[in-house]
Image (spheres, grey):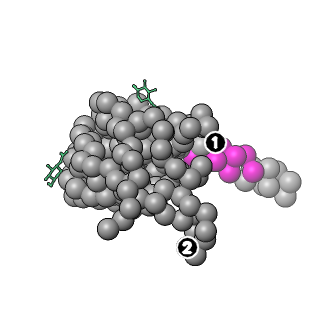
């Protein structure tokens, strides 16, 4: 009896180490797969309007509205181990208190290679506000288009597709018309 059990144990230990080795090989092969997606990002316009911190709140907080154009070809990121892609537009700026902020203002999940050719003229999907209340005197921000690849097996990988060539200034806040 004892030897049967220990044999089963040995076999399953062998199988699970084979499995681990296989998974590791898959993860490594995907890392070695060096895709370099290309794209462009243009900020068409930025407007800043006065707003409030929360609905019905009295605390004032500026809201920024960013119009942008994105073209990107993400098809090189699709291989047999690509479950889905997460594409996002990030604003990076340093506020008047010297705090660095990375804010995701737009994103899209791409699940199929057929949808991986991106051509969007859009505006921010998420509220873009400055917590210290105002974008006044905040130095110009950089905008970048980034992605995560979610694989079936292995680790998330990250990358940047495009970045604004020059930082983009926040205009003065104007009353909403
Ligand atoms: C963005 O796209 C719109 C609509 O296609 C176009 O009118 C505009 O000129 C483009 N702006 C930039 C900065 O590329
Ligand atoms: C924006 O990018 C430029 C050039 O890469 C860099 O020098 C600057 O520090 C960046 N600004 C912010 C706010 O990250």
Query: Which span of residues is magenta-colored?
Result: 9-19
In front: 25, or 32?
32
> Does residue 29 lie above or below 19 as drawn?
above
**What percent of the width, then of the height, locates residue 39?**
24, 40
In front: 175, or 171?
175
| Left/right of residue 102 with respect to residue 149 in the rendered view | right
Q: Quadrant of residue 111?
A: bottom left
Query: Which marked residue is nearer to the observer: mark 1 or mark 2?
Result: 2
| Residue drawn at point x = 56 percent, y = 38 percent | 96
| Residue drawn at point x = 86 percent, y = 54 percent | 2
Q: How many marks?
A: 2
Residue highlighted by disc 2: 55
Residue 10 falls inside the magenta stretch: yes
Task: Name the secondary structure under disc 1.
Answer: helix
Q: Are marks 1 and 2 in contact (CB under 8 Å)?
A: no
Q: In this orientation, does residue 142 appear?
A: no
**What percent of the width, then of the height, locates residue 159?**
41, 37
| Residue drawn at point x = 61 percent, y = 63 percent | 59
Q: Residue furthest right?
A: 2
| Residue drawn at point x = 48 percent, y = 56 percent | 62
In space, the residues marked 1 and 2 are separated at their CA atoms by: 55 Å
**Quadrant location of the C terminus in the rendered image:** bottom left
Residue 25 falls inside the magenta stretch: no
**What percent of the width, then of the height, locates residue 10?**
73, 46
> Between disc 1 and disc 2, whose residue precedes?
1
Residue highlighted by disc 1: 17
- Give the crowd class for mark 2: few <14, some 14-19, many >=20 residues within 10 Å: few
**What percent of the width, then of the height, locates residue 3?**
82, 51
| Left/right of residue 88 with respect to residue 58 in the rendered view | left
Task: Name the secondary structure under disc 2.
Answer: loop
| Left/right of residue 53 with respect to residue 120 in the rendered view | right
């Amino acid at each position: 009896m004892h030897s049967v059990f220990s044999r089963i144990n040995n076999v399953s230990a062998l199988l699970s180490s084979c499995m681990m080795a296989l998974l590791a090989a898959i993860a490594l092969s995907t890392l070695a797969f060096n895709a370099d997606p290309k794209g462009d990002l243009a900020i068409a316009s930025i407007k800043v309007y006065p707003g409030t911190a929360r609905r019905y709140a009295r605390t004032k907080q500026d809201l920024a509205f960013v119009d942008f154009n994105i073209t990107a070809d993400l098809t090189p990121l699709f291989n047999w181990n690509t479950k889905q892609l997460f594409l996002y537009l990030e604003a990076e700026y340093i506020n008047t208190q010297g705090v660095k902020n990375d804010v995701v203002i737009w994103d899209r999940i791409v699940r199929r290679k057929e949808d991986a050719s991106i051509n969007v003229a859009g505006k921010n999907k998420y509220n873009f506000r400055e917590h210290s209340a105002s974008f006044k005197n905040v130095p110009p921000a950089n905008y970048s288009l980034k992605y995560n690849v979610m694989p079936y097996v292995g680790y998330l990988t990250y990358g940047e597709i495009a970045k604004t060539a020059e930082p983009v200034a926040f205009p003065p806040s104007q009353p909403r018309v």
